[in-house]
Image: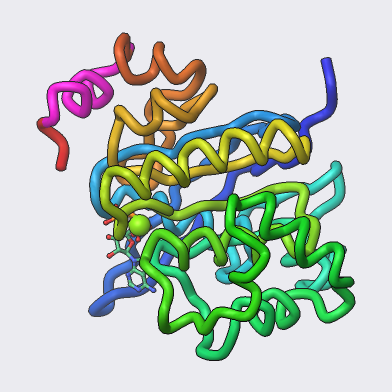
Amino acid sequence: MNNPLLEVTHLNRHIVQNGKTVNIINDISYQFFNKIIYTIIGPSGAGKSSLLRLINRLDEPTSGDILFHGKSFGRYSPCELRRKVGYLFQSPYLFEHTVRDNLLYANKKLSDRELLFLMEEVNLKPDFLQRAINNLSEGEKQRVALARLLATKPEIILLDEPTSALDPSATQTIEQLVKDIVIREELTALVVTHHPEQALRIGQEALLLVGGKIIEAGQVEQVINNPQTKSGQLYKARELK
Ligand SMILES: Nc1ncnc2c1ncn2[C@@H]1O[C@H](COP(=O)(O)OP(=O)(O)OP(=O)(O)O)[C@@H](O)[C@H]1O
Ligand SMILES: [Mg+2]
């Protein structure tokens, strides 16, 4: 079997709230392999975003480790890591000015040809490069955010509810783009979603998180349609919010 691209081992993140310690990530261990779309599902407050933030080094674990290519995160510079492991926020995090400015901000070495290629990757016409961010629709902004994510040539993309602000048609576009890009660029994606149907549409594997723990993991159909645990069955029955 291949080596995992990313591995989390006994990952914990504890925070102190009103004098009480809360385990928002609770002893999570998992191996992520190359060229697979993993979906991370679970009720609100389960720790989905917290897990992605640890994997992008936006937060530090209380204990445990994260290995990328078998090497501990601590041995990479945060900059290098954020180029290789890109994070897409729920609402596009773009600054005013043009699409081109936003892409160059991510990677100032991009040539004109590479800029055009990025537009092509997210199905936007070349003249979008000159467009001001403020004049774009939410769906277009999310596509620019995706292009900006790809501008650093990442190996892993972390998407936190990438379609939650979008209408059904823009949602479908983003879902298809993510699937196409992962195959074309041979990436690995971890996609947080609130919608089991979305996980089934785009994911190969799923991790069900409840209370900061992995409750079920494996093939997406299995995790969503045939859960083995009580919590997994409650989630399927929509009884965990
Ligand atoms: N910086 C923080 N300070 C205090 N509590 C936090 C912090 N970050 C996360 N939490 C708490 O940790 C838990 C997990 O939060 P997280 O945002 O990871 O959940 P989530 O699964 O992404 O939920 P949602 O589906 O609503 O986005 C929640 O109870 C949240 O209130
Ligand atoms: Mg979240």
The range drawn in magenta is 228-238
Q: Can I make out residue 62 in this image? A: no
Q: In this image, 102 relative to 110: left or right?
A: left
Q: Quadrant of the C terminus?
A: top left
**Position above or below: 218 against 168:** above
Residue drawn at x 67%, y 84% as measured from the top left: 101
Residue 97 position within the rendered picture, expressed as x and y whole percent measured from the top left:
56, 90
Q: Nearer the viewer, residue 51 or 18?
A: 51
Residue drawn at x 67%, y 37% as measured from the top left: 182
Residue drawn at x 62%, y 56% as measured from the top left: 55
Instruction: Answer with the quarter of the image where residue 126 lies.
Output: bottom right
Residue 56 position within the rendered picture, expressed as x and y whole percent measured from the top left:
63, 62
**Position above or below: 30 against 114:** above
Residue 43 position within the rendered picture, expressed as x and y whole percent measured from the top left:
24, 43
Q: In this image, 170 relative to 217: left or right?
A: left
Instruction: Answer with the quarter of the image where residue 201 lies.
Output: top left
